[in-house]
Image (spheres, rainbow, N blue to C red):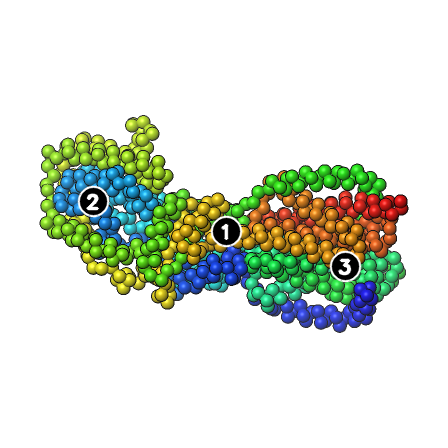
Amino acid sequence: MKKRVFLNLGSLVASNHISLLFVFLLVTALSMYVMTGLKVKMSFKDLMPRDDPTVIELDRIIDHFSSSSNLIVAISGNEEELVQFAEDVAPQIEAIKPEIKRVDYTSDRDFLARYGFMLTRTSSLKNMRSMFKDTGLLPFLTAINDNFEKTYIEDDEGLSNAEKEDQAVQSLDGIRNYLLTMKQYIESDEPLPTAIGEDVAERFLLGEPYYLSPERDMILLFAQPAFPIDNMDTVIPVVNRVDSLVTAGLAKYPSLKGGLTGTMTLARDETIGAQEDMNYTSIISFVLIILLFIFSFRMIAAPLLAGISLIVGVIWTGALAQIIYGHLNMMTSMFAVVLMGLGIDFNIHIISAYQDARAHGDSPAKAILSMYSHCGNGVLVGAMTTALAFLTMLVSKNTGMKEFGFIAGLGVLLTMLSAMIVLPPMLLLRERLSSRKKAEKPIKAVSFTFLGNASAFIARNRWLVAILTLLLTGFFLYQAMNIRFNYNYLDLEPKGLSSVVLQDKVIEKYDLTTDMFMVTTETIAESRAIADKAKQFKSIGMVSSISSLIPSTLEQEERKPLIEVIRDDLVKNTNSEFEPANMDAFIDELYRLEDNIIELSQLAFMGGQDKVDRKAKTITGDMELPPEKRSSIVQGLVAKIESKPDAVESLKAFHEAFQPRMHEIALGMTDTTTLTLDILPENIRNRYLSKDGKQFLVTIYPRKQVWDFAYLKDLKERMHEIDPKITGMPLVFYILIQYIGKDGRLAAMLTIAVVFLLLLVDFRSLKNTLVALIPLFFGAIWMVGIMKLVGMQLNILNLMGVPLILGMGIDDGVHILNRYRVEGSGNIKSTFTSTGKAVLLTTLTTMLAFGSMGFATMRGLASLGITLFIGIAACFVTTLLVIPAALAIIDKTKEK
């Protein structure tokens, strides 16, 4: 039946090749037009099943909250230039309307200057009351010490969570500025501008105005986009515009370094990287395959025609991918390279069989019939087994594997169809247009007789080869069982990607990562409950919630009387004069302050609060160093005071600049108006409120890089303790790994079952089916074992190589056994000499195609290419070792 179908197809092609080529040209041109709309989505969110609750919630947040994605400018350098850079560049970025809503690089000082005390914890308000009774120089410093001891030394909860840790850093920053400016006044022989003392007062009460790191050597600018992260048509041009503005800004400040990071920058980098990888790896793959083809067949025209046939199949596939899905994802983005590696195999078998027929003197039309008769079934079965291996991925729950399986499976069938119906008419047309004489002999291809000789040697030494193969397989199995899985998503990215490098620096400087968890609530009270729970975990670096700006009604009612007392104290404030007699007591208070900060530093060190420890050491110096090498601000200030005769006057001058502004700001912060949502400025509300104004967003930032799997697993469990609805890219990635593990195992088992049944139907022999499957299993084991030996690890992308090899690696055995059935029993050498040539070439071309993926900048895609390169080679070697030995054993058994 199949033979008759192939003969009819051959007759159709032979008699109508011109008409067929015209039809195929029209179909391909239309497909190229459709394919131009194909887009690339590189977020691993797009690999997840669309009905997964975590993905549904994340999509909903992305749609309703523009602050769910971030575009961050991170710049390092000296403080003064960092501030100038921010002031220069932020307005330029903000001018990108309407795509950028605003750029945040300073704290909400106006809001704090009015409601600062209402936002202060009740316990802190109680502790700080004494600071405003007498704001004279000595009483104020004494009150600072008293407040410091009550808040951090006597209170065991003083550094109990990330929020309190940040408050401690802010307090230390204020004290540091206070001491340094005091020292500046003492050192100066000329009167200093009043603004210097006023600035210290503002920083002391309102905190650092800019988003500087604790060491003050990095600044962050947050650009809030007005579009979702999955709108890549907008993401790429907008991020590029911001990038160009930052680059131009850095050119003005040569000492500054930095760039863009955050989720949107990474999405831009991934998408552009994938598109570039897809383009140039496809070109590399195509060129290498055609060169090998030309060398092997010692002709140019036929390999180029095979290349055209291959490209036609890829275009047809791309067009259908656009019609069905409209996009490519992280896994499907390299479909062209995959199909070049697989699709060229069909063209090689067809050209090889056609060339053999022409070499035996057949006419072009008869050679076409001979080609279909000899290799048509092998090409069809090989394509079906490979396609079915891919299509088994349709049972996967994760969208990435499902779409990849469908596109690749469909692509294999289409490239096979192109080889079967496009290449033969082109071969006939080439013959028709050729100027060579009929009597001229075809060019002889490179001989592959060594394969026949090798198979004959293996057949003669079948038992020795079988034992050695089993031993090698056992060794590789042991290695495969010890291979590790790399869960770090960033290891799939291009090495040295600037957005990832900057992200690591942000983690180092700010002790939090930009990869956040998110959850929505219906009320502010729910947001507060979630934020309070999240703040209790040491692994959380920061929680952003509207509840931090709108305390509960109970908290506000508790704070109002305390604020009123502070206001009364400020109104009645006595500002006692600083006299020379106060100097000793003042110096004692300075030393007391240093002791308090040293004690806080030790507590922070033992509790793992590195930010507090580092900030404290900027004031006291490193206590592990000798006294003469320890750079202590307090020690330096005291030395200056003791060495300057008119130090009292200098201290008075500082206080006269500092105290009025401090008094003014503190008095302004005593507003006891009840804080509600309506009071918040619009730019603050937009960070937390959904577009429809019905929900609130709580964002939770971990302390360190989330892609450490053990850390991510712990975070996932803690997040679900807080609220089961919590979502975010890290959680999506964690769940994706679980899906891929389950789906990969299921796809592998289904592939084995489908391939087994297909071969059983085709061969109608359990014996031949098992002979074809044995080298496949051995090849898969060898592949993973070799990966372990060369230092590779499994990841979410190259893990797909296992089920793929089960589908692709069977081709070698299928073609060999099909040809062996035609040649007849005992013709192992002639089978491997003829069909072995095509099998070796298909192996080499497939290896070249997948090997070209190794040049991809996306390390995940490169690892998949290298994995398949190893796997294809392993399957060929095991086929060459196992099948001659197995066939020889079977033949000898028959003879007996």
Identify whether 513 is placed above or below 635. below
Task: Check disc 2 and report the residue beneath it.
Answer: 127
Q: Position of residue 221 (x, y in %)?
A: 37, 53
Nearest to the observer: residue 748 or residue 875: 748
Residue 316 position within the rendered picture, expressed as x and y whole percent measured from the top left: 65, 65
Image position, residue 232 (x, y; %):
49, 61
Q: Residue at x 16, y 44 (%)?
A: 130
| 10 Å crowding of disc 1: few (<14), some (14-19), many (20+) | some
Where, quadrant-wise, is the N terminus in this rendering? bottom right
Give the distance between the C-alpha atoms of the residues marked 3 and 1, in whole angstroms: 41 Å
Left or right: where does residue 234 sit relative to residue 646?
right
Q: Earlier in the sequence, mark 3 or mark 1?
A: 1
Residue drawn at (77%, 66%), measured in percent from left and top? 425
Quarter of the view holding residue 385 = bottom right
Secondary element at tag 1: helix
Amino acid under disc 2: Asn
